[in-house]
Image (cartoon, coloured by chain):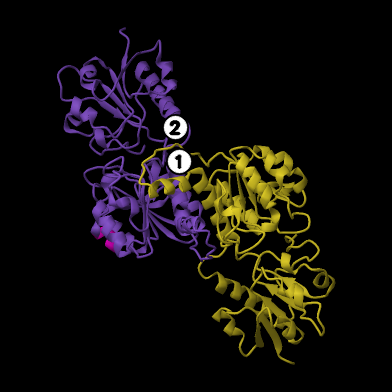
Chain colours: A purple, B yellow
């Protein structure tokens, strides 16, 4: 049996991957050398999930790997026509980011409810200014995205007493965790009631740009919008105009159309907007967790067993079991 | 039957109290006029719970009210010798602040774990700087205070997957909510294991100054200390020295020895210290909630029924039922 060749697209792969030694031939490449090395690879492990390098290199000459794994939950950069049409299996990091992102979103909800940002501005000015703040208990959230990340956000906020409306691709009345899941078509009817609107959806042609002027106009003036999905879910100029008009009353973006967010972007100092650098899921040890997850799947690959977390390339995410 | 005279110590009482009209004669006073009006009052309603006016006025001539209600959970300013020795019943606002304060503490825990403060500093500088942050799930908290506020903090953090050690006056192995409650004497053994140390205790001679250099020295370098009790629980100079030495790694104070915190205080810009102006429990409508709670108790008083939330003046708080 010839040795499996694993090509790793990453300048600085985590040491945990050294455990492939003796079991596979590990090749490394960066964006520039990817095209040249791709024909040698049985397996491609993509660390830089925001890169378009795979899309650019894929159509070249020679064979292509039968399995591509991305160390991310979102697979949007891999859903280009040539990969879609191929037999190559795509897997993702489903599961690793659920709880970290849910904690991050709960933190943003509480920080916005309790006006922490303003408190810290006042602290810088050494000003003692008592204010009243919002209760989170009894408030309402719409969570867009019924995959594991959206679900964990929903259960985490529910544990704080927030009423959750979970939105997925299709409506369901028999969901084991939430009872009802709303279809995306129902979103316009849900937005006017929400105190919190959280986007944790996969980026697909259906969900791209779904948060636009029309969506923001349906939100309450006091509502807050949080995006931990992908920058492409939001029409950023529409959000900027909406925040300037005071509807919604605030927002937090961890993801952007262009990352890193350029220093000249008007988003940095938009009133009521909290900017963070695509880090909501990245807790200490995350790269080790992602490596372990790949190694588990590599065991399956070598044993000829079905891979875990296989993306439905047409849907753009890993469908739920059952 | 002569009309009950309710004296309200507050410059600006909430309109909800107008519902006393026809049922009581409502008298208003401020700190300066309290001493003169005290002999007329059957009931004293204290809004400014940080004031020493009651302590100063109480020893004067004439009769004293049979019931003093304070619109706060803490009764520390009322536990002076003359009131302790009197037959006057003291009641407090037990219950109103539990959930708001627990949400506030959960928000601080998440904000500190996720490094929000630093993200907001970087946002001001328009700098995109990805960092890894801590998981809250699986971390450990010591919550000092086994009254309703400490308990709600404990259950709220537990819902986020935090392991809780609840500390009260006396050890118990049969607590309905937490199983074990640790005695305050056990605190030194608990502090070295804690990622989060939260003070939500009543301020009594036993708890005053309990967070001093010795306590901070027992905390982990990465631990964070949060005080939503009273400023008197903390030896502020010791905390300042401890933070400068990096143990604990951070702190958040909502309460201070002197409030408002003077603009010249070194606490405003101590590294790793988050300052907020004694507002953790004060959600929109809190003064109405407090007024409703007083009105309920006033019904009991007029009907000759036992009052709710009667403080054990010797202990310094309302003991748990049963």
Question: Residue B171's spot in the image, x, y percent?
Answer: 76, 48
Residue range (magenta): A214-218
Left or right of B267? Residue B69 is: right
Left or right of B246? Residue A109 is: left
**Residue labelled with disc 2:** A286
Q: Chain of mark 1?
A: A
Q: Is residue B60 above or below residue A153?
A: below
Q: Residue at x 55, y 46 (%)?
A: B272
User: Residue B161 occupies which quadrant of the picture?
Assistant: top right
Q: Residue at x 60, y 53 (%)?
A: B266
Residue B34 colored in magenta in the image = no
Label 1: few (<14), some (14–19) or many (≥20) C-alpha neighbours in 10 Å = many
Q: Is residue B147 above or below residue A29?
A: below
**Residue labelled with disc 1:** A100
Q: Residue at x 36, y 16 (%)?
A: A302
Q: Is residue B84 above or below residue B213?
A: below
Q: Residue at x 79, y 81 (%)?
A: B64
Earlier-in-chain disc, 2 versus 1: 1
Left or right of A222? Residue B298 is: right
Q: The C terminus of chain A is located in which quarter?
A: top left
Q: Does residue B172 appear anywhere in the picture?
A: no
User: Residue A82 occupies which quadrant of the picture?
Assistant: top left
Q: Are marks 2 and 1 in contact (CB under 8 Å)?
A: yes
Circle 1 SS class? helix
């Amino acid at each position: 049996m010839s040795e499996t060749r694993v090509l790793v697209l990453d300048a600085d792969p985590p040491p945990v991957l050294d455990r492939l030694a003796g079991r596979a031939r590990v090749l490394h490449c960066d964006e520039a050398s990817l095209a040249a090395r791709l024909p040698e690879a049985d397996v491609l492990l993509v660390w830089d999930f925001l890169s378009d390098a795979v899309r650019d290199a894929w159509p070249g000459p020679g064979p292509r790997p039968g399995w591509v794994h991305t160390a991310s939950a979102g697979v949007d950069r891999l859903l280009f026509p040539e990969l879609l049409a191929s037999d190559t299996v795509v897997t993702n990091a489903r599961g690793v980011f659920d709880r970290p992102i849910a904690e991050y979103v709960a933190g943003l909800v509480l920080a916005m409810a309790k006006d922490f940002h303003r408190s810290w501005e006042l602290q810088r000015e050494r000003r003692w200014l008592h204010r009243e703040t919002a209760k989170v208990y009894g408030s309402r959230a719409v969570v867009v995205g019924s995959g594991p990340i959206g679900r964990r956000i929903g259960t985490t906020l529910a544990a704080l007493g927030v009423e959750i409306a979970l939105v997925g691709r299709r409506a369901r009345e028999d969901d084991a965790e939430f009872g009802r899941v709303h279809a995306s078509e129902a979103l316009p009817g849900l937005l006017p009631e929400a105190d919190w609107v959280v986007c944790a959806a996969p980026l697909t042609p259906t969900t791209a740009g779904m948060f636009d002027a029309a969506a923001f106009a349906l939100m309450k003036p006091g509502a807050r919008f949080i995006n931990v999905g992908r920058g492409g879910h939001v029409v950023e100029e529409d959000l900027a105009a909406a925040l300037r008009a005071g509807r919604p009353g605030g927002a937090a973006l961890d993801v952007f159309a262009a990352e890193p967010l350029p220093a000249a972007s008007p988003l940095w100092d938009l009133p009521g907007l909290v900017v963070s650098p695509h880090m909501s899921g990245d807790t200490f040890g995350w790269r080790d967790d992602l490596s372990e997850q790949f190694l588990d799947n590599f065991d399956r690959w070598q044993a000829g067993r079905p891979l875990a977390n296989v993306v439905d390339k047409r849907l753009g995410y890993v469908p739920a079991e059952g």
